[in-house]
Image (spheres, grey):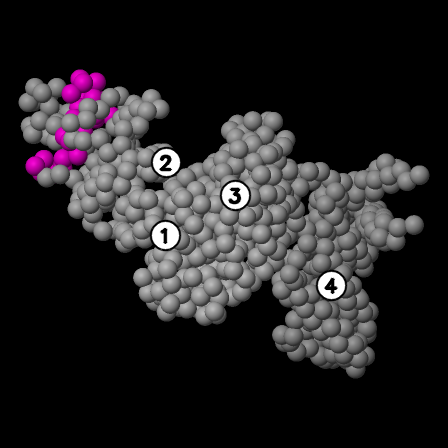
Amino acid sequence: MNLEKVVFGFFVLLAATLNFGFFIGDIADPALHNIYELFAAVVVSLIATVLKFGDRTQIGAVHLATSLVADLQLITAAIAWTYAAHISADGLTPAAMASVVSLSGGALFANVVSVVLLVVETVSFHRR
Amino acid sequence: MSNPLLAFWFRLFGPDDDRTSPRMRSRVPVVSAARASATIFLILRRMRAPLIVLITIFAISVLGLTLVPGHTEDGQPWRMSIFDAFYFMSYTASTIGFGELPQTFSDAQRLWVTVSIYLTVIGWAYAIGSLLALVQDRAFRQALALQHFMRTVSRLREPFLLIAGYGRTGELLGESFDALGKRFVVLDADEDRIEALELAAYHADVPGLVADARDPGHLAVAGLANPHCEAVLALTDDDEVNLAVAMAAALLRPDLPVIARTMSPAVAERMAAFGTPTVVNPFDRFGDHLRIALRAPASYQLMTWLESGPGAEVPARGDPPGEGRWVVCGYGRFGRELIPDLHAEGIDVTVVDPVADQAGHGSGIVRGHGFEPEVLQQANVADAVGFVAGTDNDTTNLSLVAAARRVNPGLFVAARQNRPSSAPLFAAMNVDSLLVPTEVLAHEVFAQLSTPLLWRFLQEVPARGDQWAARLVDCMTRRCGRHLDALWKVRMSRADAPALVPWIDSGGARLGDLLRDPDDRDVQLPVVVLMVARDGECVLTPDDDFVLAPGDELLLCGRHAARRALDTTMVVEAAREYVVSGRHVPVSWIWRRFSGAA
C-alpha cells in the first residue's frame, strides 16, 4: 500500500464531496448552503493542490492543473460570499447566493475531472 | 519528456531542429538537459510539507475563531464571520497585529487566539525556514546553475568553442579568443575555477558550469549538440577525462574538430583511435620547438610571436649554443619526450636522475640529484654546452639552474616551469628557453583555431630557412610595431570584397595597390601579407607585384586601424578606385549620374 497515494486520493475525494455538499440544493436559497462547508472545501482543495506539487508525470501535471482550477473557482466563490455578506449594501440576496453557488458548481466540475483522473491513474497502474 | 511543460520548453529553447540532422540529434543525450528544468519542481516538492502545515493551521485557527462565542459592546451574543476571522488571523499570523477587530474579544475568544498565535508563528517560521534552507541548498543551487547555463548556451547564436577544463591553459586561451571576439563555453569539475571564470573580465558573457566533463550529458548541456559549436577542446589536467571527452565528441559529433591535451603517448594513441583528434602533448611539442630554436632562432621567434595571441610583444631572438654535449636533469615524462628529440639533432646527452632506469638511446646516466656538486661533476657539466632542468618541481628546477650556472656560466639553459606562481622567479633567472606546459598548449590550440590559414602558415615556416624568417620579423616590426595587433583572413570573393571583384577580374590587381591607404594612396598601410592561398597552393610573403586572382585567401597581420582601412577599400568602390588609380570618383548614385561616371 502506498501511503502517499492513499493520502492524496483521500484529499481529492474529500474536496469533491465537500464541494458537492455545498453545491446541492436550491441555488438561490442561502439556508440550503452551509458557509462552513464552503470553507472546508476551500481548505481541502488547497491541501490537495499542494500535495500534487513537484509531481513530474504527465498525469500529475494535469492533476495539478485541474486542482488549480478548482481552487480558483472556490476562492472566487468565497470572495463573492464575503462581498455579498460584508460589503454590498443589499446583503446576501438570492442573486448573490446564486452566483456563489454556481461558482462552486464550476469547481465541482473540476473536482469531478480530478476524481476521474484519479480513477484512471489507479486503473492503469498495474503492479503484478 | 513526459511532461507537457517540458515539451513546451523544448519547443522554445531546444536546439534548432532545422539546422541539426535528425541522426545527430538522436545521438546526443538530453537526459541532463531535462534535468535542467528540475528547479521549479524541486522548489515545489520541498515546499509541500510546510505549505500543508500552514494551510492546516490557518484552517483550524479560523474555524475555531468563528465558533467561539463572543459579545458586542452592548452585551448581545456575537460570533465572528469566516471573513472576519480570516482577516484577523492573517494579520496576527504574519505578526503585524492591529488589535481586536471588529469587536473587543471575550475571554473565550482570547483563549483560542492565544493558542492560534503560537500555532501560526510556528507554522510561518517553519515555512520561511524551509524556503531559506532550500535557497541555500547545494542541490538546489546546482539545479539553478544548470538551468541558467543551459539557457545561455542554447541561446548562443554565433559560433563557439566548447572548452572542457579551465585551468591555466583555458585562461590563456580564453583571453586570446575573447580578444578575437570568439565565444566559448566552459566545463570544469572544480568550483573554484568556474568562480574564477565568473570573475574574469571578458567582453562576452562566458557560460561556465561545475560538472564532470566525462559525462556525455554534461557535454550535451554545454552545447555539443548545438549546430553553432565549432570545436571541442579537452584541456583538463587529467588524461582520463580528456580521453573521455575526445571519445564522446568523436562518437556524438564526428564532424567537429577535437583538440585534446595529454601528457602520455599511450593516451595519445588511444585518442587517435577515435576519429582524428588533434592531440597535443606539451612535452613532445617543447622538444620540437627546442629543435627549431637550436637550428633556426629567427623561425622560432616568428612562430612564437604569431602563436602568442593578440597584443603579444615580439619575443627576444634566442642565441643557440654550438656543437656539444647536453646535460638533462630529470628523466620523467618530460625527459623521455625530450631526449629522443635531442638525439635526432645529433646531440650527445647525459641524463641525471635519482631513480633513472636504463635511459637507452646510448645516453650516459648519472644517478643522484643534479643540484649536488659531486653529481654535477660526475655529469661533467663544466664542458657541456646545454643544460635542461626538467623535473616536476619548480624549486628543484631553480636550484638546478643555479648550481649548473655556478659551475659553467656560459651554459645554454632550458628549464621547465610547472606552476604559474613561479613565473617571476624563472623570469629573474633569465633562462634561455623556458617550458611552461600550459602556455605551449595554449599557443598550439590558438594557432590551430584562431585564424584559418595561420596553422598552414606555421607548418610552412621551418622549411623556409632562418634568413627568410629574420627578414619577415624585421618587416613586421618595421611596419606594424613591436606588438602583434591582429591576424586575420580575407577572401577575394563577392561576399567579402564586393568592390574588388571587377578590378581583380580585369587581371591587373597588384597586391601593392591593395595595401595603399585609402586616405592617402602614397602611404603604405601598416599591414604585412603573410600568405596567399589559392586552390590549395600557398604563396608565402608575396611581394607587391603579386597579381591577385578571384577566390584568393590572404592571411594578414597588422594594426587594427589598417584592418579597418583595408575593409573600406574592399567594400567601398570609390575608395578602391582611388587606391588603384588615384582618381576621386563620386560615391553617391545621384552624383554619379551627374558626373556621368556610372
Question: In the shown orientation, is residue B168 left or right of residue B40?
Answer: left
What segment carries the magenta color? B498-522
Residue plotted at (76% across, 73% down): B119
Marked residue nearer the N-terminal end (1 or 4)? 4
Cα gap from disc 2 to disc 3, whole angstroms: 19 Å
Q: Is residue B355 visible?
A: yes
Q: Amino acid at mark 1?
A: Gly
In the orientation shown, which residue stands out farthest toward the top? B506
Displayed quadrant of residue B82: bottom right
Q: Position of residue B409 (x, y in %)?
A: 33, 65
User: What is the number of the mark on residue B70?
Assistant: none
Q: Neighbour class for label 4 at 10 Å: few (<14), some, many (≥20)? A: many
Q: Neighbour class for label 3 at 10 Å: few (<14), some, many (≥20)? A: many
Work out whether disc 2 and disc 4 sit on a shared chain.
Answer: yes
Tell whether position A111 is magenta.
no
Which mark is nearer the camera, 4 or 3? 3
Chain of the residue on which disc 2 is drawn: B
Which mark is nearer the camera, 1 or 4? 1
In the foreground, B373 or B310: B373
User: What is the number of the mark on residue B50?
Assistant: 4
Quarter of the figure that contains the C terminus of chain B: top left
Cα gap from disc 1 to disc 3, whole angstroms: 36 Å
